[in-house]
C-alpha cells in the first residue's frame, strides 16, 4: 500500500492557473469603491436639496404668490384668455397696478386708476384724467368711453378704489354704476408675472 500523503491542492492542475490580485490592485479596487460611495452620497444630497427647494417654492407660490388663469378679454392686449399669471398677495396697491379682487363671488382682474379722494374724468374719446391731469396709458390698445353711466367727473369715495379694464370698449368696471368702485378689503393682490404662454413670460406692467 502506498502510504505517501499528497496535499489535495498541491499539484492540482485546476489551481495552477489561478491569479490572485496583488495588494496594489486590491487597494485600487477599495479606493474605487470609496469614491463610488462618496459620489452616491453627494448625488443623494443634491437630490434631497432640490426636492426641498422645490417644496419651498411650491409653498411660497401657494401661500404668497398664487397662480391665476385669465378669463375674458377685458385686459387685452397685455393679458388674454388662457394666460397664467402669478399674484402677489398684498393690500398696498397703487394706481397703475393690475389688481385682483373679489366681486360677486368671482375673482376679477382690472387696472387701478383712482385712489380715495381722486377725481376721475373721461372724455368722449376715452382719454382719462385723474385730478385734472391726462393719464398716460401705454397699456391701452384702443381708448373708448365704454360702458359708462356714472356722472363725470367722478369723485372716488373714501376707502374705495376706481378700476378699469385695459380693453376699454369691452370691460365692465367702475365706469358702470352696477359695479362701481371696490373696497380695499376686496383686494387679493396684484399681478406681477406672466408664466404662460412660454413665449410671453415676463412681468405684468
Image (tube, rainbow, N blue to C red):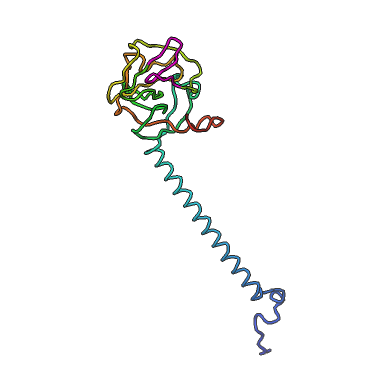
Residue 128 inside the magenta-drawn segment: yes
- The x, y position of residue 10, in whole percent, is 68, 82
Relative to 174, 11 lies left or right? right
Question: Residue 100: x, y in percent?
Answer: 38, 27
Number of numbered markers: 0
**What is the magenta range?**
121-135
Relative horizontal placement of residue 144, taking residue 198 as reference (left or right): left
Residue closest to the far left: 158
Q: Is residue 147 magenta?
A: no
Between 182 and 63, the residue placed more toward the observer is 182
Locate residue 173: give its quadrant.
top left
Q: Residue furthest front?
A: 132
The residue shown at (33%, 11%) is: 151
The residue at the point 48 percent across, 24 percent down is 79
Query: Looking at the picture, how far across and down is residue 59, in whole percent?
Result: 39, 42
| Nearest the eye: 124 or 9 | 124
Give the vertical position of 160 relative to 7 (above or below).
Answer: above
The quadrant of the picture occupied by the N terminus is: bottom right
Residue positioned 37% across, 35% down in the render: 89
Q: Quadrant of residue 159?
A: top left
The one nearer the camera, 112 or 46, is 112
Q: Residue at x 37, y 20 (%)?
A: 131
User: Considering only vertical position in the picture, is 194 above or below 76?
Assistant: below
Q: From this view, report whether residue 149 is shown above or below residue 195.
A: above
Relative image position of residue 18 (x, y in whole percent): 69, 73
Residue 12, compared with residue 98, is above or below; it is below
Amino acid at each position: 500500500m502506498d502510504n505517501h500523503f499528497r496535499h489535495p491542492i498541491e499539484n492540482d492542475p485546476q489551481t495552477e492557473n489561478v491569479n490572485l490580485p496583488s495588494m496594489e490592485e486590491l487597494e485600487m479596487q477599495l479606493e474605487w469603491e470609496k469614491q463610488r460611495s462618496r459620489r452616491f452620497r453627494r448625488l443623494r444630497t443634491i437630490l434631497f436639496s432640490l426636492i426641498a427647494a422645490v417644496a419651498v417654492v411650491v409653498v411660497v407660490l401657494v401661500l404668497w404668490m398664487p397662480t391665476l388663469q385669465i378669463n375674458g378679454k377685458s385686459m387685452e392686449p397685455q393679458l388674454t384668455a388662457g394666460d397664467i399669471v402669478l399674484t402677489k398677495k398684498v393690500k398696498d396697491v397703487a394706481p397703475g397696478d393690475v389688481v385682483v379682487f373679489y366681486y360677486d363671488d368671482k375673482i376679477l382682474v382690472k387696472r387701478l386708476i383712482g385712489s380715495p379722494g381722486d377725481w376721475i374724468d373721461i372724455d368722449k374719446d376715452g382719454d382719462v384724467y385723474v385730478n385734472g391731469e391726462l393719464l398716460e396709458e401705454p397699456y391701452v390698445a384702443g381708448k373708448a368711453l365704454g360702458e359708462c353711466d356714472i356722472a363725470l367727473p367722478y369723485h372716488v369715495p373714501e376707502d374705495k378704489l376706481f378700476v378699469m379694464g385695459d380693453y376699454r370698449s369691452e370691460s365692465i368696471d367702475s365706469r358702470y354704476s352696477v359695479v362701481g368702485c371696490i373696497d380695499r378689503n376686496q383686494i387679493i393682490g396684484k399681478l406681477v408675472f406672466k408664466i404662460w404662454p412660454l413665449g410671453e413670460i415676463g412681468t405684468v406692467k
